[in-house]
């Protein structure tokens, strides 16, 4: 192998094809992160209120369930909207 001569790429490899990806994987990961952050924020808010009012664990429990419920509802709405868009695209084709 001559160090003076640069290596040539193999024919057809100048533009490698992109790696196959799972469609919507980013959106699903974002929903999972949203769910976790939502519960965490509601948990912290519940703890803070409980400390201020001296009602530990009442608001912590209420806020965790409220955060989970709100997050589930938000994810449900996003999934239904995505499903509606996919159905419309299929009808157009």
Image: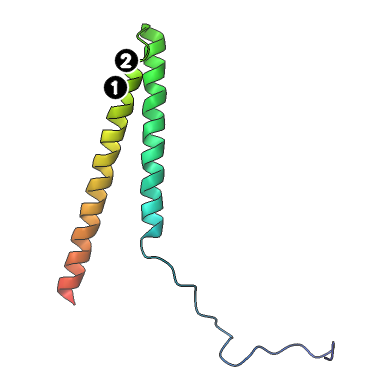
Q: Badge 1, how many Cα within 10 Å: few under 14, some, many 20+? A: few
Asked if residue 3 is positioned above or below residue 61 in the image, the reply reads below
* Viewport quadrant of the N terminus: bottom right
| Element assignment for label 2 | helix
Q: Marks 2/1: CA distance? A: 6 Å
Q: Residue at x 31, y 31 (%)?
A: 67
Coordinates of residue 7 in the picture (x, y in percent): 73, 88
Coordinates of residue 88 in the picture (x, y in percent): 17, 66
Near-viewer residue (86 or 54): 54
* Viewport quadrant of the C terminus: bottom left
Coordinates of residue 62 in the picture (x, y in percent): 29, 22
What residue does disc 1 label? 62
Q: Residue at x 27, y 35 (%)?
A: 70
Mark on residue 45?
A: none
Would residue 83 appear left or right of 45 to someone viewing this image? Answer: left
Q: Residue at x 41, y 37 (%)?
A: 37
Asked if residue 4 is positioned above or below residue 80 in the image, the reply reads below
Mark on residue 58?
A: 2
Q: Residue at x 25, y 53 (%)?
A: 79
Mark 2 and mark 1 residues within 8 Å of each other at the beta carbon: yes
């Amino acid at each position: 192998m001559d160090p003076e001569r640069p290596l040539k790429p193999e024919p057809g490899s100048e533009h490698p094809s992109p790696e196959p990806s799972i469609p919507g994987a980013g959106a699903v990961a974002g929903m999972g992160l949203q769910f976790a952050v939502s519960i965490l924020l509601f948990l912290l808010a519940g703890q803070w209120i409980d400390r201020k009012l001296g009602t530990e664990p009442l608001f912590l429990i209420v806020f965790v369930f409220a955060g989970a419920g709100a997050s589930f509802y938000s994810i449900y709405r996003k999934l239904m909207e995505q499903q509606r868009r996919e159905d419309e695209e299929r009808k157009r084709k």
